[in-house]
Amino acid sequence: MIDPDGFRPNVGIILCNDAGQVFWAKRINQDAWQFPQGGIRQDESHLDAMYRELQEETGLKPHHVEVIGVTKRWLRYRLPRRLIRRHSSPICIGQKQRWYALRLITKESKVRLDESETPEFDGWRWVDYWYPSDKVVSFKRKVYRRALKELMPLIKPQETASPPGG
């Protein structure tokens, strides 16, 4: 499902622990790390898509997490030209995402990256809150910073820091 502007609706998930660290996952067979994320199906709300993607990518179920918040608007990023599939119709030029802040309320051992028939990740770790904003693939950095900045007061209300570099 691609919107009229060429953006695929998607959800992003910022999962945190009680220490305010965030879940950082390694894409399977790659040296590429990111937050869990995925597309919204035509018959789904973004909340339903978030729970589906959470379970597919981390093995966590709704009762394993607490929803802390969601971004107020869609956050968009464009794909680099080399990643745009010009021969598909409609053409997808990027993604528009609603980002969810979740808190893990169960044991870490409930994280199972192999729950899906086609796992997306083969490793994960907790990292400092702003770490992903500089480590994710470059074309996603602005969206990561915007999502982290908007959701920070809900995840780490005692802090007012901005992302590194502004």
Image: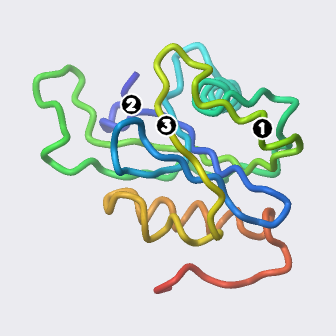
Tag 1 or tag 3, which sits nearer the N-term?
Answer: 1
User: How far across and down, in percent of the image, does residue 37 sit?
Assistant: 53, 39
Q: CA distance from mark 3 to mark 1?
A: 15 Å
Tag 2 or tag 3, which sits nearer the N-term?
Answer: 2
Q: Residues within 10 Å of mark 2 (few under 14, many from 20)?
A: few
User: How far across and down, in percent of the image, does residue 105 sit?
Assistant: 88, 44
**Callout 3, which amino acid?**
Asp
**Callout 2, which amino acid?**
Asp
Tag 1 or tag 2, which sits nearer the N-term?
Answer: 2
Quadrant location, the N terminus: top left
Judging by the rendered image, the residue that carries numbered circle 1 is 109
The image quarter in which residue 162 lies: bottom right
The residue depicted at 49 percent of the width and 37 percent of the height is 122
Q: Residues within 10 Å of mark 3 (few under 14, many from 20)?
A: some
Element marked by disc 3: strand
Q: CA distance from mark 2 to mark 1?
A: 38 Å
**Callout 1, which amino acid?**
Ser
User: How far across and down, in percent of the image, does residue 147 sit?
Assistant: 58, 60
The residue depicted at 80 percent of the width and 70 percent of the height is 156
Judging by the rendered image, the residue that carries numbered circle 3 is 122
Asked if the residue at tag 1 contacts the one at tag 3, i.e. Cβ–Cβ closer than 8 Å, the answer is no
Q: Is residue 109 left or right of residue 98?
A: right
Element marked by disc 2: loop
Judging by the rendered image, the residue that carries numbered circle 2 is 3
